Amino acid sequence: MSPDATPRLRTALVLTASDRSAAGTRGDASGAVLADRLTALGFVVAREVVADDREAIEGALRAGAEVHPLIVTTGGTGLTPRDVTPQATLAVVDYEVPGLAEAIRAEGRMKTPFADLSRSVVGVRGRTLIVNTPGSPQGAAESLEAIVPVLDHALETLAGPHDHGRGDGDSDAPADSTEDQHAFGRAEDSFSEPEDAD
């Protein structure tokens, strides 16, 4: 295998935003749950805890995106003035991925109507996917699980190469074209042209 063909190490950062966890007065249970699940998915996981401070969160996200293709945050997605993780995430991402945030809320909504109060954001910085999850261990776990079915494909797409509309011939996965991605994984007959009515 040539050096260029060596698979990249799959790493992820779990970033916990919590005043109490940062101060050492409460354990980081939600961060541990996320780290365990990501490890089971094949990621080498780093963990970091910061206070509910927008500048601290932004700094951690920027630094993490220099190293990791995936960052999953936990905490700070509610309605209180100290819940600033979504604002920090929006400040550092290049663009949002609203479908994943919608999937997270839809999954939570099946368990509790309070999921609609979550302001979780999913976005991309460079080639890094950043995913906000709630601060509760159960909420964090359910949110991550909601995007697991598409997580690998999202990361593969971000990793490139970015050659719109041209596949590499060795994979049936789509190139970067949005249309190709929407068609991928669907039954072929769902895209058949309707017959002309005579």
Image (cartoon, helix red, strand yellow):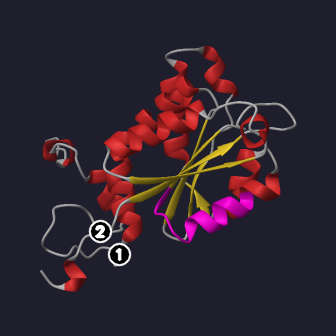
Is residue 153 toward the left or the right of residue 60 in the image? Answer: left
- Locate residue 81: give its quadrant: top right
Which dot marks residue 77?
none
Q: Secondary structure at mark 1?
A: loop
Amino acid carrying label 2: it is Ala
Residue 14 image position (x, y, % from top left) = 54, 48
Residue 103 in sight from this viewpoint = no
Is residue 116 toward the left or the right of residue 156 in the image? Answer: right
Amino acid carrying label 1: it is His
Residue 153 painted magenta: no
Q: First in sequence, mark 2 or 1: give its number.
A: 1
Q: Dividing the image into 4 quarters, which one contains the C terminus? A: top left
Residue occupied by mark 2 = 175
Q: Nearer the viewer, residue 82 or 188?
A: 82
| Dominant secondary structure (helix, strand or loop) of the stretch shown in magenta | helix
**In whole angstroms, how far apart are the C-alphas of marks 2 and 1?**
6 Å
Outermost residue toward the right?
81
Residue occupied by mark 1 = 164
Residue 181 image position (x, y, % from top left) = 32, 57
Residue, x 57% and y 30% (percent of image)? 29
- Locate residue 61: give its quadrant: bottom right
Residue 63 painted magenta: yes
Q: Secondary structure at mark 2?
A: loop
Q: Would you say the residues marked 2 and 1 are in contact, meaning their CB atoms lie under 8 Å apart?
A: yes
Residue 164 in sight from this viewpoint = yes
Residue, x 50% and y 63% (percent of image)? 128
Disc 1 packing (10 Å; few <14; some 14–19; many ≥20): few
Residue 83 image position (x, y, % from top left) = 78, 38
Q: Dividing the image into 4 quarters, which one contains the N terminus? A: bottom left
Magenta range is 58-70
